[in-house]
Image (cartoon, rainbow, N blue to C red):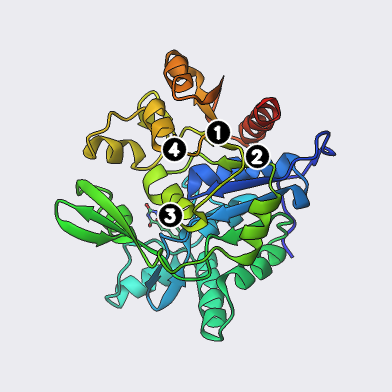
Amino acid sequence: MTQNSTHNNHSPSTVHRRIVALAGGVGGAKLAQGLAQILAPEELTVIVNTGDDFEHLGLYICPDLDTVCYTLAGLANPETGWGRANESWNTIANVESLGGPAWFRLGDQDIATHLERTRRLREGQSLSQITKDFCSAWGIQHTVLPMSDAPVRTMVDTDEGELAFQEYFVHRRCEPKVKGFRFDGVEGAEPVVGAKEALEQADAIVICPSNPWVSVDPILQIIKTINKPVVAVSPIIGGKTVKGPAAKMFDELGIEPSALAVAKHYRNILTGFVLDKTDSLMEDDVKNLNVQTLVTDTLMNHLTDRTRLAKDVLHFIGSL
Ligand code: FO1
């Protein structure tokens, strides 16, 4: 059992608040970790994007689930945000020497996750059951759920044709120009049972600072209607993404990348929006969308930043 090295100092909840956080990759995982530092296990459920999942080297890989879990468990690689800390690369190096694909960097510890998940899926276990078991093995007390147990695959339409997500994101380093997205399998995919319950019981939904196009939209398409207060944290600061292609995607889709563009992307469901201080001049434009606003420091480099932002967001929710 790996002790959760990021000490949880759950403050007893002054106001009873049940939060559902919607998260994708690295940015979403950071805020989820901040929320987990403050909220008790029964107060926080994280619903994670699985559109980035793919089969590679015969392994079923769930990058966003693993990024959220590794981050919550304090096991994530601090430089990249994805994969494990203190990693070694012997297996993938030997795959490469045998002529196999090494473009998707799978570390030795990380491969154990994919081997065991693939084994359990082949035995007929559900992705949500596997995730539950892995969370307890990693000492994670909060609930982490895949957005669905049914497979969904984000396909990126580009000027070079349609690419599977990891082919676009990792192999092609996001170079092709995006023209649109398709979430293959999303039509028939149902949210997992725990997600429906968490959404019904939630006091508010937090959309973490993940990529709106490829990390958050798949989750929103699956959970469909939300009749709860929704607060989103902008993943774009000063017209740029902290990490990842969200700003480039807005630009290639003909939309000026900005926090305001993100607020407009979510405008049909938004109650509140959190902008970085850099974008304080945009606050009134966001308010004009009939959305309440919070301007604060949204950069999350260390655990203290993540916890502080989470505190700001929870306080903001309390004021809505
Ligand atoms: N991202 C990269 O840019 N390069 C990689 O080689 C890479 C490997 C990788 C392995 C496991 C994993 O869970 C994530 C990995 N990622 C890598 C990140 C991943 O592609 C993205 O985090 C998500 O798919 C988008 O958030």
Residue at mark 2:
34
Which quadrant of the render holds ligand 1?
bottom left
Q: Relative to the observer, which residue lies in front, 162 or 168?
A: 162
Q: Nearer the viewer, mark 3 or mark 2?
A: 3
**Residue 61 shows up from this direction:** yes
Which image quadrant for residue 192?
bottom right
What numbered label is drawn on residue 266? 4
Q: Amino acid at mark 4?
A: Tyr
Pointer 1 with pointer 4, Cβ within 8 A: no
**194 above or below 239?**
below
- Asked whether mark 1 and ligand 1 are closer than 8 Å, the reply comes as no
What numbered label is drawn on residue 218? 3
Pointer 3 with pointer 2, Cβ within 8 A: no
The residues bearing labels 4 and 2 have C-alpha atoms spaced at a distance of 22 Å
Q: Nearer the viewer, mark 1 or mark 4?
A: 4
**83 above or below 14?**
below
- Mark 3, Cα crowd under 10 Å, few <14 / some 14-19 / many 20+, is many
Residue at disc 1, secondary structure: loop
- Of labels 4 and 3, earlier in sequence is 3
Residue at disc 4, secondary structure: loop
Q: Nearer the viewer, mark 1 or mark 3?
A: 3
What numbered label is drawn on residue 300? 1
The residues bearing labels 3 and 2 have C-alpha atoms spaced at a distance of 23 Å
Q: Amino acid at mark 1?
A: Met
